[in-house]
């Protein structure tokens, strides 16, 4: 838990969405393995009905308790999934780097969204309408296989997050928050250089900026990461993923 940057009743930031032209969509979606696996007619459906928007840092992408009208993906930047309480407290569930798609569970169940989605870096965000998602789900075997695989990996991610928050010390929680961004099934585009600040790492781990800085310095001394302004180079992904696991 950490203090929320704003209350959930108003947008987090004062930027306005900037829609990207439809001509740019093929380039963005061609990077997605699930899109490349679709039949041509289904690819055309996505390109006709989906859209993408540029959002500034702090912008509210989707609101808790609002209808799940879209399946959402990150083409560039970084989003977080978080819960804000009326008292101004917040809990971050997950970060979503480029290549990640999320919200399929709520779209499938046609339920209200259970969390706020906030940009913590300038981001290009893709929106696939719920109706398009359900059409693909009913007509495309490759898309069905992708969604089943996605849900299975998502469940594993959230179980690990709960386990980490309850059983690991702060250094290990910070390490595991970074390690989650390297899940190749959920986030296939994550490279060893993360365009993320120490403050943003703290948001993902649910700790203060000062404590996040200390944890990253400890990881740097161990030769696992190299920290610079608004960037973290992961020097050893395997050691990062294993860090703190002996505590469990």
Image (cartoon, rainbow, N blue to C red):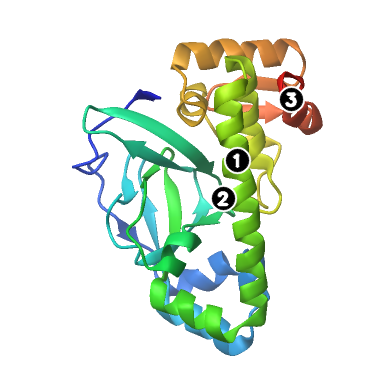
Residue 71 pos. (x, y %): 45, 64
Residue 114 pos. (x, y %): 36, 50
Q: In this rendering, does residue 47 appear at all?
A: no
Q: Identify the residue at horizontal 54%, vertical 22% (top origin).
A: 229
Disc 3 and disc 1: Cα gap in Å? 14 Å
* SS of the residue under disc 1: helix
Badge 2 or badge 3: first in the primary sequence: 2
Q: Identify the residue at horizontal 37%, vertical 43% (top origin).
A: 118
Residue 196 pos. (x, y %): 53, 32
- The quadrant of the rendering that contains the N terminus is top left
Q: Nearer the viewer, residue 68 or 219?
A: 68
Foreground disc of the pair 2, 1: 1
Label 3: how many residues lie within 10 Å, few (<14), some (14-19) or many (20+)? Answer: some
Marks 3/1 in contact by CB < 8 Å: the verdict is no
Residue under circle 2?
98
Q: Nearer the viewer, residue 200 or 93?
A: 93
- Please say if 49 is above or below 10: below
- Please say if 132 is above or below 241: below
- Please say if 128 is above or below 160: below
Residue 110 pos. (x, y %): 37, 68
Residue under circle 3?
245
The mark total stands at 3
Q: Nearer the viewer, residue 6 or 32?
A: 6
Q: Identify the residue at horizontal 25%, vertical 32% (top origin).
A: 6
Residue under circle 1?
159
Instruction: Give the image quarter of residue 9.
Output: top left
Disc 2 and disc 3: Cα gap in Å? 26 Å
Q: In this rendering, does residue 164 appear at all?
A: yes
* SS of the residue under disc 2: loop
Badge 2 or badge 1: first in the primary sequence: 2
Label 1: how many residues lie within 10 Å, few (<14), some (14-19) or many (20+)? Answer: few
């Amino acid at each position: 838990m950490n203090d929320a940057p704003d209350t959930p009743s108003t947008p987090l930031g004062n930027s306005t969405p900037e829609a990207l032209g439809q001509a740019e969509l093929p380039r963005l979606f061609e990077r997605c393995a699930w899109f490349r696996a679709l039949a041509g007619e289904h690819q055309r459906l996505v390109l006709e009905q989906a859209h993408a928007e540029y959002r500034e840092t702090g912008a509210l992408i989707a609101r808790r308790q609002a209808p799940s009208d879209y399946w959402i993906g990150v083409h560039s930047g970084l989003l977080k999934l978080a819960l804000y309480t009326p008292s101004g407290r917040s809990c971050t569930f997950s970060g979503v780097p480029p290549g990640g798609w999320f919200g399929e569970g709520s779209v499938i169940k046609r339920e209200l969204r259970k969390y706020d989605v906030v940009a913590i870096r300038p981001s290009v965000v893709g929106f696939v309408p719920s109706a398009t998602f359900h059409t693909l789900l009913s007509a495309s075997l490759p898309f069905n296989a992708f969604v089943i695989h996605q849900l299975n990996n998502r469940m594993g991610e959230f179980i690990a997050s709960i386990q980490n928050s309850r059983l690991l010390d702060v250094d290990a929680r910070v390490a595991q928050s970074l390690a989650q961004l390297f899940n190749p099934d959920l986030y296939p585009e994550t490279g060893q250089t993360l365009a993320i600040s120490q403050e943003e790492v703290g948001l993902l781990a649910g700790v203060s900026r000062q404590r996040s800085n200390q944890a990253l310095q400890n990881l740097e001394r161990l030769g696992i990461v190299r920290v610079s302004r608004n960037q973290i180079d992961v020097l050893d992904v395997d050691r990062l993923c294993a860090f703190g696991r002996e505590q469990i």
